[in-house]
Structure formats: C-alpha cells, structure tokens
Amino acid sequence: MQTKVADPFLTILEAGARIRRGELVAFPTETVYGLGADATNESAVKSIYLAKGRPSTNPLIVHVPEIADARKFVTALTSAAETLAKHFWPGPLTMVLPRGAGLTPVVSAGRDTVAIRCPKHKVADALLRTSERPIAAPSANRSGFTSPTTAQHVLAELDGRIPLILDGGACAVGLESTVIDMTVSPPMILRPGAITREMIQELIGPVNTFHGSVSVEVAAASPGLLSRHYAPRTPAFRFTRAQWESVRDKALRSTDMLILLSHDPSISLAAPHETLLLPPDAAGYAKAFYSALREADERHGSSIYVLSPDNESEGLWAAVADRLRRATVVI
Ligand code: TXA
Ligand code: MG
C-alpha cells in the first residue's frame, strides 16, 4: 500500500470519504497525530489494531466534534463530566464514561466504558464533520513506541500500512491528552496531560491520580499505564541533576557516542557525544519532547541520557515526567 502525505485543505473531502468507506486516515490533533477510523465500523476499528500492532485488549479513544455527540454514545454524562466537557472541550481531555449504543464495542476492547474526547484542531474538526462519523484514534505510532507530533513522524512509523496522512504541521501540545476515569468516585486521572490535576480539581473537587505502572494484563484497561511505553529504540536512561557528575564521568570515559537530552545549557556533553537542547519551560518542553526523542534515536548513539525535570509533580511537568518514566529507565 502506498502512503500519501497530503495537504488537509486539498484532501479533506477525500479523507472524509475514506473514513466513511472504513479506511484509516492519520490526522493531526492539538496533542499528537491520531490514526483514525469510523468508530461505528467494527472492521475499520479492527484495522487500527492491525496497523499499529496494538494488543486487541487495549481500548481506543473516540473523537467527536461536540459535547452533543458525546452524549449520543454514553448512557449518561454526570454533572461533573458535563462541567469538565464544558470547560475543557474542545481540548486535550479524554473522559472514560459508561458506553451507550452506536459505537462498535471493539473501541472499548470488551469493556462497558468508552473514552471520549473532542479535539481542538481545525483539521481534526474538519475530518470529524466531513466524515460525519465519530472517529476512533490512538496515537499514530507502532504500539509501544514514541507518539508522532508531525506528519513525517507518522510516515516513519506507518509507511505502507495506511493510505493517507493529513499533514497539519507540528502539534501544539505535543503530549497525549489527559485521561480521566469518570466512572469511579472520586474520578481517577489515568494519564496526566495538559489539562492538569490542579485545573480539574478547581472545577469538580478532589480527584485521584493513578500512580506507578501495571502489568501487561492489567494494562489491557489502559495501555498508557504500561511501565514501558512511548519508548525510543535506542536504550534510554534518565538522570537527576544530582546525578549529572556521574553521567559526565561516564561520558568522559566512553568512546561510544552518547546522546544527551538536556533543558539546561550548563548540562551538556562535547564530542564524540551529542547534546540536544530542549526548552526550559514545561509547555515548550512538552511540545518538543517526542521530536527530540526521535531525533536522539536517529543519531544512532549507543544510548540516550535525559535530564529529568526538577519539578516532577506540578502542572504540565507531571505529564512530562510520566512520559519520561515510561520512555526511559533510571541510570
Ligand atoms: O491525545 C490523545 O489522547 C491522542 C490523540 C490522537 O487524541 N490519542 C491517544 O490514544 O493518545 P492512545 O490510544 O494512544 O491512548 C489512549 C489511552 C490509553 O492509555 C488507553 O488505555 C486509554 O486511553 N483508554 C481508552 N479507552 C479506555 C477505557 N475505556 N478505559 C480506560 N482507559 C481507556
Ligand atoms: Mg498511544
């Protein structure tokens, strides 16, 4: 299969028609690129799993253009869910809700819940409206690897496996949406993202955050919870500022090329090693992170070392730290 990378403004009608025919279309959202299929079509949704190499037990996020569409596919929106939808949609928040009628159960991988979000991106919105379908879309990468934030990243992951990629440039947020389970009380954040715990609690009161990672079996519920996820192909390690001396000493002794990802210019390595500098602020870091991991992978060093953020629990840094923990191991 030939994979076409296309200008969305010239191709949106074709893309909508492909979704309606049950084909896969990769498209940009404000978070990362998604691999979309008609969420009402069982065989279309099954082909997402095939293209990604994703275990069939892992459920998908269903994208809709408006709150009203979300209401169609759930049994009920609680008032807390209504409040979050009104404040944060369109935007990078996914809510796990009791599944109603109309969607293929394959999106839920056998569960009685469905994850729904309304993306904030004009191309995603145009695709949802022209196809007139809810669109199931995981991140458009091979299962377990780094999520794509550009059309070129999608092509690198899925060339020959899907017919069409809509090129909408680089994603503004750069990390996947916050996933919150609204079927439990209090609600539980399953995956941190740009809609932070603080922002959610301000509106609906206390919520729990899922900490740690789970086994492959348990992760059937939420694959982003796997201890190793979002990972580059090169062995990748993380270290704290306090461990910099030992990383530098190791680099000085090493004849292999190490790739350093740092967001502090005073923490860098000279040749034969390479340093990729990330922005020091959380939003800038989040946006650049997956691209930097891919670039680090492409340098073909013997290993990748990433300086951990100092503030791992606050706001968007919590989401960055979560992805970093799953993409790397401690030194
Ligand atoms: O930002 C995003 O959310 C992107 C863009 C394309 O919208 N999508 C995305 O999808 O990251 P994916 O499949 O890579 O991650 C979806 C996460 C997984 O951790 C999955 O387990 C969880 O949402 N999830 C989906 N349905 C669920 C459900 N019914 N219950 C619990 N977790 C669910
Ligand atoms: Mg993913």
Image (cartoon, grey):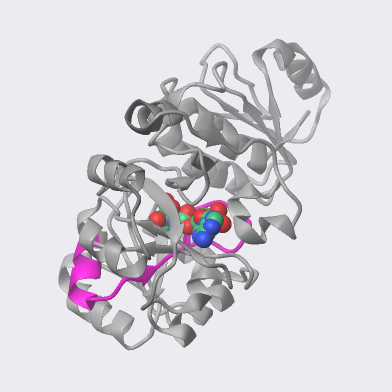
Whether residue 145 is in magenta: the answer is yes
Residue 255 position in % (x across, y down): 80, 31
Whether residue 40 is in magenta: the answer is no
Vertical placement of 117 versus 110: above or below?
A: above
Residue 230 position in % (x across, y down): 60, 49
Q: Nearer the viewer, residue 194 or 230?
A: 194
Vertical placement of 87 versus 61: above or below?
A: above
Specify the segment rendered in magenta: 125-148
Q: Is residue 14 left or right of residue 230?
A: left
User: What is the quadrant of residue 219 in the picture?
Assistant: bottom right
Q: Nearer the viewer, residue 203 or 165?
A: 203
Q: Is residue 93 left or right of residue 112?
A: left
Q: Nearer the viewer, residue 41 or 304?
A: 41
Q: Nearer the viewer, residue 121 or 182?
A: 182
Q: Is residue 1 visible?
A: no
Residue plotted at (18% across, 78% down): 13
Q: Main secondary structure of the magenta part?
A: loop
Residue 269 position in % (x across, y down): 64, 21
Residue 149 position in % (x across, y down): 41, 50
| Count of numbered circles in the view | 0
Residue plotted at (57% across, 71% down): 109
Q: Is residue 264 left or right of residue 195?
A: right
Q: Is residue 215 visible?
A: yes
Q: Quadrant of the C terminus?
A: top right
User: What is the quadrant of residue 86 in the picture?
Assistant: top left
Vertical placement of 118 versus 137: above or below?
A: above
Vertical placement of 132 versus 94: above or below?
A: below
